[in-house]
Image: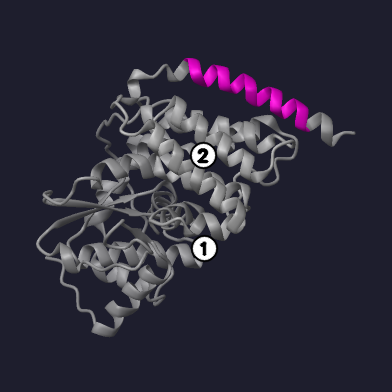
C-alpha cells in the first residue's frame, strides 16, 4: 500500500500552484481556473489531459527529467493532487490527436501503455517531492510488453473545426475587411453552414484582436498556415467534445474536468465562460462591440431554434476541399500585396 505523509501546508502549496496557473478547468467548478467543488460533493471526477500535459508527463517518465521547471512542477502537482483526491486522469483525447498526426496506432499505443503504467508505478511521495522541487529527477519507466489499442479514427468534431479554421484563415488574410467585418462575416457563415460552437465564436475575436497568436510568423509558408489551422482545430475539438460530456451533467455520477498547459486554449475557455458580452466590448470597443453583439442577437433570432443535425450529416470533406481553395486564393492575394 502506498502511504503518503503530507503536511497541510504542502498540500495547499500544490493546490495553489494548480489554481494559480489555471491547470484544471470546468464551466462550474473552475470557470476561471480556480477549483471549487462545493456543489459537487459525492461525485466521481476524471481529468481529461490535453496533448501538452500528456507530452510533458511522458517525457518525464521516459527520460527521468524535464528541463522546463514550470512544466515539471505542473505535471507533478497534477499527479499528486489527483492521487490524493482520488481523481482519475484520462489521456484518450490527446492520444486520438496523436494517432491522427501519425496516421496510425503504433506510437499512440506505446504512449498509452506508458501512461497507464505511470499512475501506479511511482509512489505518491515521488510526485510530492517533485512538485515541491525537493527533487528534479525520477527513475525512468521502462516497459518491455505492450498491449494493443486503437486510437486512429476520424473525428467529425475535428473535421468541423478544421473547416472553421480554414474559413477563419481566409478572413484573417483578407486585407480589405475590417476586424468587425471579418467577425460578422464569420458569424454569418457559421450560422448558415455548420453547427455553432461557443468556443469558436469567441476564438475568432480573440484572434483578430491579437489576444491569441495562431498565425504569428508564418514566414510566407502556406503549409505552416495549414498546420496551424490543424493545431488550432484540435484545441477547439478538445473543448467541443468535452462540452458534450459536461453539458447535462446535473444527474451524472461522473464529472469530467479538463487539464491543460496551453495558455491560449485556457484563454479561449475562460473568456467563453464569462457568459456575457463584455469580452467583445473589451476587445473591440463600444461601437464595434455593439454592432457585433447586435449581429449575434439577430442571427440567434433568425436561426433559433435550429433543427438538430448530427455532425456526420454535413459533407465536411467536400466543404473542406472548397474552403481550402478559397484559402489558397486569399493567400495568393495577401502574398502579392506584400511583394508590391
Q: Nearer the viewer, mark 2 or mark 1?
A: 2
Nearer-the-camera pick, 258 or 287 = 287
Q: In which quarter of the image is residue 223?
A: top right
Proximity of marks 2 and 1: CB atoms separated by less than 8 Å: no
Q: Which mark is residue 231?
A: 2
* Mark 1 crowd level (few <14, some 14–19, many ≥20, 10 Å Cα): few
Q: Name the residue under label 1.
A: 68
Give the image location of residue 287, x and y in percent: 61, 54
Is 78 placed left or right of 266 in the picture? left
Magenta segment: 318-334
The chief SS type of the magenta part is helix
* Residue 200 visible in the snapshot: no
Check the image and report above or below for 306 versus 266.
Answer: above
Closest to the observer, 279 or 219: 279
Residue ID at (22%, 63%): 83
- Give me the disc on residue 115: none
Residue 264 visible? The answer is yes
Which residue does the image show at 67% across and 47% down from the upper left? 216
Side of 50 where 309 appears, left or right: left
Placement of 317 over or under 152, stated as above or below: above
Q: What element carries label 1?
A: loop
Which residue is pictured at 82% across the width and 29% down the height?
336
> Residue 181: percent from the left, percent from the top?
63, 39
Looking at the picture, how far across and down is residue 118, in whole percent?
A: 28, 53
Amino acid at each position: 500500500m502506498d502511504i503518503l505523509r503530507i503536511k497541510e501546508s504542502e498540500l495547499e502549496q500544490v493546490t495553489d500552484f494548480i489554481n494559480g496557473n489555471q491547470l484544471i478547468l470546468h464551466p462550474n467548478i473552475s470557470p476561471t481556473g480556480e477549483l471549487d467543488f462545493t456543489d459537487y460533493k459525492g461525485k466521481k471526477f476524471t481529468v481529461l489531459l490535453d496533448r501538452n500535459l500528456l507530452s510533458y508527463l511522458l517525457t518525464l517518465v521516459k527520460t527521468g527529467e524535464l528541463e522546463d521547471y514550470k512544466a515539471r512542477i505542473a505535471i507533478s502537482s497534477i499527479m499528486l493532487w489527483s492521487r490524493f483526491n482520488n481523481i482519475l486522469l484520462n489521456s484518450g483525447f490527446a492520444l486520438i490527436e496523436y494517432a491522427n498526426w501519425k496516421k496510425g496506432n503504433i506510437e499512440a499505443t506505446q504512449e498509452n501503455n506508458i501512461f497507464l503504467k505511470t499512475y501506479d508505478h511511482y509512489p505518491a511521495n515521488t510526485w510530492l517531492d517533485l512538485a515541491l522541487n525537493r527533487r528534479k529527477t525520477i527513475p525512468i519507466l521502462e516497459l518491455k510488453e505492450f498491449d494493443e489499442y486503437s486510437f486512429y479514427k476520424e473525428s467529425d468534431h475535428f473535421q468541423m473545426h478544421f473547416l472553421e479554421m480554414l474559413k477563419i484563415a481566409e478572413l484573417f488574410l483578407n486585407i480589405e475587411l475590417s476586424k468587425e467585418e471579418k467577425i460578422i462575416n464569420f458569424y454569418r457563415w457559421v450560422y448558415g453552414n455548420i453547427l455553432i460552437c461557443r468556443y469558436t465564436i469567441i476564438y475568432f475575436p480573440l484572434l483578430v484582436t491579437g489576444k491569441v497568436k495562431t498565425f504569428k510568423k508564418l514566414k510566407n509558408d502556406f503549409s505552416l498556415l495549414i498546420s496551424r489551422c490543424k493545431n488550432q482545430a484540435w484545441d477547439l475539438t478538445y473543448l467541443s467534445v468535452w462540452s458534450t460530456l459536461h453539458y447535462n451533467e446535473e444527474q451524472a455520477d461522473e464529472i469530467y474536468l479538463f487539464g491543460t498547459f496551453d495558455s491560449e486554449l485556457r484563454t479561449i475557455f475562460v473568456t467563453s465562460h464569462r457568459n456575457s458580452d463584455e469580452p467583445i466590448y473589451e476587445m473591440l470597443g463600444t461601437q464595434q462591440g455593439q454592432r457585433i453583439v447586435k449581429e449575434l442577437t439577430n442571427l440567434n433570432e433568425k436561426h433559433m431554434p435550429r433543427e438538430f443535425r448530427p455532425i456526420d450529416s454535413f459533407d465536411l470533406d467536400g466543404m473542406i476541399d472548397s474552403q481550402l481553395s478559397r484559402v489558397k486564393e486569399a493567400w495568393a492575394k495577401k502574398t502579392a500585396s506584400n511583394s508590391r
